[in-house]
Amino acid sequence: MAARKKDGARPGGADPLAEYRSKRDHRRTPEPVPADGPLPRGDDDTFVVQEHHARSLHWDLRLERGGVLVSWAVPKGIPTAPDADRLAVRTEDHPLDYAAFHGEIPRGEYGAGTMTIWDRGVYETEKWSDREVKVVLHGSRVSGRYALFRTRGENWMIHRMDPPADPDAEPLPEAPRPMPAAERARLPRDQDAYGFEFDWGGRRLLASIEGGRTRFTDARGRAVAGPAGLGGPLGRAVGARPVLLDGELARVDGRETYLIFDVLHLDGRPLLDLPYERRRRALDGLRLTGPRWQTAPWFPGDGDAVLAAAREQGLPGVLAKRLDSPYRPGEDNDAWRRIPVR
């Protein structure tokens, strides 16, 4: 990154926004494309992080400096702990107006996709050189001391220098095992104590999602490749939140679909000890519905109707899950029951 004079110009008088303008046509994109001319003067203290759903999901960190927004694309998001350095790719400088931009960049244009403001605030500069930048960010979602250091070419790394933003946060488990259901011939008598789901007859898959990237494990806790076209879009739909989902891959209306029926870990907090009913309501709150995935429905206290609907739809059975049951990975117990359609 070339050093800048106070007015934002590069050595030799080069226009710092020339590359930005060359990649955009103001008649085709809603992004701000300022005319050539003197750069505005700011206080070099504004930052913004934008979530960019482009060809691949990433987060753009932009720091106001010398009349432009110096920018890095961070594929896995801003780290929240000092033990998780992440790649940050230096991109072209952006105009200051871009700090307020959100919207849809049309297909066929550079950076096509949805841009939203993930966080913004002010920052202080501790060091700024061609190879290293140290700043203190003050935002609503990200705060603390960060260092960006150049590794090779346009590749940099971003490192959190402060202790973890959430000291109690726990990482996603490496090899999660799903909770099995016991086979039973009949519905439970006390149906009001249970939630009921359809058994779709699919393949059990757990999805660990972090930094917009998805990793699948099977019923034995082994890492497996997910179906083509599922992991990437699902990760982009979840975004920056770390989450562990339980579900099954089944055919619905002739299309292979990931049906999600439980959430086991969310935002650094394991949910295994929460009752099933609270986990299901937390899952519903995530609103995970897409072209290849959906949150499976559940029905508290109405097993007879669910079983009749499963029979009518040609499904193999239903699952009865106690509303107060915790999640016990790999552990057989009677809290979850599978009842086949007869």
Image (cartoon, helix red, strand yellow):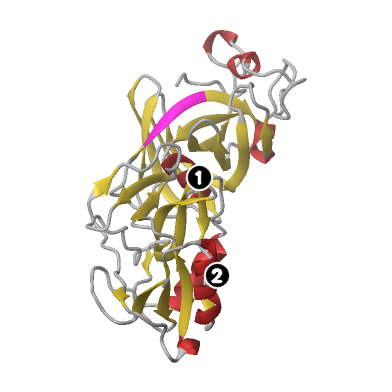
From the viewer's perspective, is 160 left or right of 92?
Answer: left
Q: Judging from the image, what secondary structure is the residue with disc 1 in?
A: strand
Lower sequence index among marks 1 and 2: 1
For the residues labelled 1 and 2, say whether their Cβ atoms are less than 8 Å apart.
Answer: no
Tell me: residue 179, above or below residue 303: above
Query: Residue 199 sits in which quadrant?
Result: bottom left
- Of residues 191 and 174, the one nearer the viewer is 191
Query: Residue 242: x percent and y percent?
Result: 41, 55
- Of residues 192 and 223, the one nearer the viewer is 192
Residue holding disc 1: 255
Q: Is the magenta stretch mostly helix, strand or loop?
A: strand
Q: What residue is shown at x 63% (from left), y 21% (from top)?
A: 108
Residue holding disc 2: 309
Looking at this view, name the residue that lies furthest to the bottom.
Answer: 190
Q: What stretch is highlighted in magenta?
A: 87-91
Q: Judging from the image, what secondary structure is the residue with disc 2 in?
A: helix
Q: Can residue 67 be seen in this view?
A: no
Query: Residue 262: x percent and y percent?
Result: 42, 66
Query: Residue 55: x percent and y percent?
Result: 52, 30
Q: What residue is shown at x 58% (from left), y 15% (from top)?
A: 19
Query: Residue 174 sits in which quadrant?
Result: bottom left
Q: Which of marks 1 and 2 is in front?
A: 2
Tell me: residue 143, above or below residue 146: below
Disc 1 residue type?
A: Arg
Instruction: Locate the C terminus and report the quarter of the image it occupies.
Output: bottom left
Tell me: residue 127, above or below residue 270: above
Disc 2 residue type?
A: Ala
Q: What residue is shown at x 28% (from left), y 49% (from top)?
A: 83
Q: Is residue 229 visible?
A: yes
Q: What residue is shown at x 52% (from left), y 81% (from top)?
A: 304
